[in-house]
């Protein structure tokens, strides 16, 4: 939705596919003046005896701006371009039978763009996928919301979700993180806060993750917050010769 900074991670198309391990899944969101930048990193290992194509998928909100999507396998880095659908389909058709690099296929179910990549990974090798995702948050129901999916596809050995807030106008509150399925903050969550900054971290141990229910693993890690509104005229910010004016009635 328009009021959320949402990121859904890559997931193996066949969860628990034999011989494929997710060694690390990390997401860092930095929100500065309601503008959210998200950096995500997924590291997979081909533990099988032969080279194989590892299928993954990345859903992105239709309103999102993806500024980087890249794959590193061995010493090779593949940087993909995000294009209009017609151009994207042509590019996919042209490279659909090339197993030397990632393959991207577009889809847009229910307002989402889904990027699918088949990554060739030699036996015993690692592949790293990285994305940069950007969006402008909108205030809804008296708050801003940043949500990250809790579902990396298969259990990663290392899982880290970080959300950093920096609002010069001041942060009036930071709501406890929650999974949408349960409404409760998962064990392993830490919150640090000052007048203008806040940091929310979720770094659960393997044991803590084993204690999550299926609903929690399929839910979302959510941070709600709002900024201070001491002046009725709102908040004006100036940068690089441009300005933006934030304002909203206090009862909205």
Image (cartoon, helix red, strand yellow):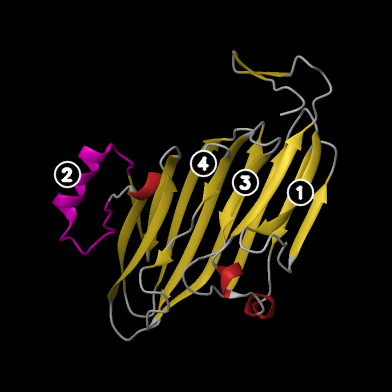
Say if residue 56 shows up in the picture. yes
Say whether marks 4 and 1 touch (CB < 8 Å). Answer: no
The residue located at (26%, 53%) in the rendering is 105
Tell me, for residue 146, which label it has, or none.
3
Where does the image place residue 87, in percent across and percent down from the top left?
Answer: 21, 39
Q: Which residues are magenta?
A: 81-105
Where does the image place residue 218, in percent across and percent down from the top left?
Answer: 54, 66
Q: Is residue 98 on the magenta stretch?
A: yes
Say whether marks 1 and 3 touch (CB < 8 Å). Answer: no
The residue located at (85%, 37%) in the rendering is 195
The relative height of residue 203 versus residue 138 in the rendered view (above or below) is: below
Q: Identify the residue position indicated by label 1 in the image.
A: 175
Q: Is residue 146 on the magenta stretch?
A: no
Q: Identify the residue position indicated by label 2 in the image.
A: 90
Where does the image place residue 66, in percent across and percent down from the top left?
Answer: 43, 42
Q: Identify the residue position indicated by label 4 in the image.
A: 1
- Which structural element holds mark 3? strand
């Amino acid at each position: 939705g328009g009021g959320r900074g949402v990121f859904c991670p890559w997931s193996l198309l066949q969860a628990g596919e034999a011989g494929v391990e997710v060694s690390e899944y990390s997401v860092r969101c930095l929100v500065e003046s309601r503008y959210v930048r998200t950096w995500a990193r997924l590291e997979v290992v081909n533990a099988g005896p032969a080279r194989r194509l590892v299928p993954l998928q990345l859903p992105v909100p239709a309103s999102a701006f993806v500024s980087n999507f890249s794959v590193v396998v061995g010493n090779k880095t593949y940087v993909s371009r995000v294009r209009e659908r017609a151009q994207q389909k042509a590019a996919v058709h042209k490279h659909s039978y090339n197993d030397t690099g990632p393959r991207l296929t577009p889809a847009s179910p229910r307002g989402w763009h889904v990027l699918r990549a088949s990554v060739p990974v030699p036996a015993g090798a690692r592949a790293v996928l990285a994305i940069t995702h950007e969006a402008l948050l909108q205030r809804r129901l008296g708050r801003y919301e940043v949500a990250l999916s809790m579902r990396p596809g298969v259990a990663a050995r290392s899982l880290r979700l970080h959300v950093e807030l920096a609002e010069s106008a001041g942060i009036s509150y930071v709501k406890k993180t929650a999974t949408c399925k349960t409404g409760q903050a998962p064990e392993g969550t830490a919150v640090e806060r000052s007048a203008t900054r806040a940091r929310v971290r979720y770094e659960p141990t393997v044991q803590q993750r084993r204690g999550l229910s299926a609903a929690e693993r399929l839910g979302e890690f959510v941070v709600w917050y709002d900024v201070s509104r001491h002046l009725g005229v709102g908040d004006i910010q100036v940068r690089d010769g441009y300005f933006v004016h934030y304002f909203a009635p206090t009862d909205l």
